[in-house]
Amino acid sequence: MDLTVHIGRLPLKNPVMTASGTFGYGEEYAEFVDLNLLGAVVVKGISLNPKEGNPSPRICETPCGMMNAIGLQNVGLKKFLKEKLPYLRQFDTRVVVNILGNTIQEYVRLAKALDGAGVDAIELNVSCPNVKKGGILFGTDLRALARLVTRVKQSVSSTVLITKLSPNVSSIPGFAKAAEDAGSDALSLINTIPAMAINIETWKPKLANVTGGLSGPAIRPVAVRMVWEASRAVSIPVIGVGGIMHADDAIEFMLAGASAIQIGTGNFLNPGATAQAVSGIVTYLERKGISNIREIIGRVDGTAPHNNTDD
């Protein structure tokens, strides 16, 4: 069974990745999941300096999902390179580092520091809805997105560049094409959707940040639609994210056009969700008599073939 997929020039042994912010730096899940089984680990977003994040409560459950407003809490670049990356490099899996900044210069400094440091890919976070500046400001402005991707691409020599797009735009194909034209090697989508929940006894928002990002199965149909639209607009690989809980969900995203998938909220409900998704994909392909997973990418029936060239 050939589960190999490609994210730009980067081969993955299988299409199952973790979603940034839901899997820590890998070590937090190592007692539940053999990291060697995964296609890639995408670590929690990294900024130049450590961030404490937003005040608590920062997470609450919602129907068919959850909301969070963590605020990009992370250990910062220096500690990541010194402590977290060496740990991850013990495993036979790709390491993708999600990066975030308030300015283009901050993104560029992060990319330069990570390029050649043993990182397989950088994922540009331009879509977090839970911070007041940076991030989503780039993800919802076509010109700002293009400038950011261009500058970061120019600052790396060997590391694959993935741009994580925001769902909070009027036209996902337009933003997907802008990122591709600016030099991004691949796309990932979607991030969480801004939402709000209220405690009717206290009359207060359930999150201290008032609003947060909605994730989980509730957003999956939205994500599938956007992956389908984006994959038809670009020729670079698309990574599907949004409410993937098990193998069947992963297959749905790949039929829509995703070359790989990321599991996020599913890790909180089932710490072994990623490894189980890998085995579930194998079972599905065997049942269908398919020996190469790339045969299903973009094969949703009743639509024109997608433009993704990862085959």
Image: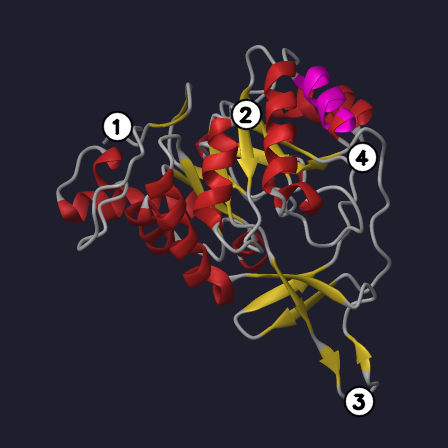
Label annotation for residue 201: 3
* 138 left or right of 1 in image: right
Label 4 or label 1, whichever lies nearer to me, is 1
On-image quarter of the C terminus:
top left
Name the amino acid type tagged 4.
Answer: Val
- The foreground one among 305 and 39 is 305
Name the amino acid type tagged 1.
Answer: Asp
Q: Are marks 2 and 1 in contact (CB under 8 Å)?
A: no
Label annotation for residue 113: none
* 47 left or right of 117 in image: right
The answer to whether residue 89 is above or below residue 228 is above
Q: CA distance from mark 4 to mark 3?
A: 36 Å
Label 4 or label 2, whichever lies nearer to me, is 2
Label annotation for residue 75: 4
The mark that comes first in sequence, 4 or 3, is 4
On-image quarter of the N terminus:
top left
Name the amino acid type tagged 3.
Answer: Glu
The answer to whether residue 7 is above or below residue 66 is above
Residue 96 at least partly seen? yes
Q: CA distance from mark 4 to mark 1?
A: 37 Å
Label annotation for residue 311: 1
Mark 4, other Cα within 10 Å: few <14 / some 14–19 / many ≥20: many
Q: CA distance from mark 2 to mark 1?
A: 19 Å
Judging from the image, what secondary structure is the residue with disc 1 in? loop
* 172 left or right of 123 in image: left
Which residue is under mark 2?
161
Q: For the magenta stretch, what is the residue range?
A: 105-114
